[in-house]
C-alpha cells in the first residue's frame, strides 16, 4: 500500500528500543523499528546471553512482534547503534527482513535508503523452496 514513510519517526523508535537492549557482553546495544503495510510499527532490541552464541539480534525481536501482533509485510526498516546512528543489519538479519518484507522493503542504510534487493542481492527466499 502506498504510504508516507516517517524515517525520522522510525529511527526515533529504534533508538528508544536500543535503550532497552540487554547487551552486557558486547556492550553494543542495537534497536530496530519496522513499518508494516497496515501502518503498525514493530521493533526490537538485542538480547544477549552468557552463552554468547545464543544472543538474539534486535531484528529477531522485531520479527517476533510482527508475527505475534498479526503478521503483515515489512515496508521500511531502521536499525540503530548506541548513538542512535543508522547501521546495517547483519547478514542473518537481512535474511529475516527478506522473509517478511521481500525485495521491495526499504532499509535505511549509512548510504541512504535502499531496497532489500540491493542489500541482499540474489537472496534465497520462500519462492526457492517451490522451484
Ligand atoms: N546485532 C543486532 O542486534 N543486529 C544486527 O543486525 C547486528 C548485530 C547485535 C548482536 C550482538 O548482541 C551485538 O549486536 C554485537 O554483535
Image (cartoon, grey):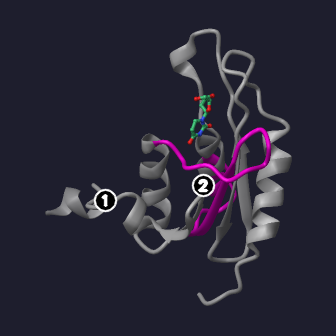
Q: Rounded to the nearest whole Å, what is the CA distance between mark 1 and mark 2? A: 16 Å
Q: Which mark is first along the chain, 2 or 1?
A: 2
Question: In this figure, which residue is indicated by the disc labeled 1?
Answer: 126
Task: Give the image location of residue 119, x and y in percent.
Answer: 42, 59
The numbered mark at residue 38 is none
Of 35 and 38, nearer the camera is: 35
Would you say 11 lies left or right of 57 here? right
From which residue to which does the magenta span run? 64-90
Task: Give the image location of residue 2, x and y in percent.
Answer: 61, 90
42, above or below 102, in the image: above
Would you say 89 lies left or right of 85 here? left
Q: Is label 1 in a helix, a strand or a loop? A: helix
Would you say 55 lies left or right of 16 here? left
Q: Residue at x 26, y 61 (%)?
A: 122
Confirm whether the magenta stretch covers residue 25. Answer: no
Q: Residue at x 66, y 22 (%)?
A: 48
54, above or below 75, in the image: above
117, above or below 61, in the image: below
Q: Is label 2 in a helix, a strand or a loop? A: helix
Question: In this figure, which residue is indicated by the disc labeled 2?
Answer: 67
Task: Give the image location of residue 61, x and y in percent.
Answer: 65, 42
Q: Residue at x 76, y 52 (%)?
A: 14
Numbered label tally: 2
The yes-or-no answer for disc 2 within 8 Å of ligand 1 is no
Of 81 and 41, nearer the camera is: 81
Residue farthest toward the left in the current orientation of the protein: 131
Residue 109 picture quarter: bottom right
Would you say 115 lies left or right of 124 here? right
The image quadrant where one finds the C terminus is: bottom left
The yes-or-no answer for disc 1 within 8 Å of ligand 1 is no
Amino acid at each position: 500500500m502506498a504510504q508516507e514513510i516517517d524515517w525520522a519517526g522510525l529511527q526515533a523508535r529504534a533508538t528508544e528500543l536500543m535503550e532497552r537492549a540487554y547487551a552486557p557482553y558486547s556492550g553494543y546495544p542495537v534497536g530496530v523499528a519496522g513499518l508494516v503495510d497496515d501502518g503498525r510499527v514493530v521493533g526490537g532490541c538485542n538480547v544477549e546471553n552468557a552463552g554468547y552464541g545464543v544472543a538474539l539480534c534486535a531484528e529477531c525481536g522485531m520479527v517476533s512482534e510482527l508475527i505475534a501482533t498479526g503478521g503483515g509485510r515489512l515496508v521500511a526498516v531502521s536499525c540503530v547503534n548506541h548513538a542512535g546512528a543508522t547501521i546495517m543489519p547483519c547478514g542473518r538479519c537481512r535474511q529475516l527482513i527478506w522473509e517478511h518484507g521481500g525485495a521491495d522493503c526499504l532499509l535505511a542504510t549509512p548510504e541512504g535508503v535502499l531496497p532489500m534487493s540491493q542489500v541482499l542481492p540474489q537472496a534465497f527466499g520462500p519462492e526457492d523452496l517451490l522451484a
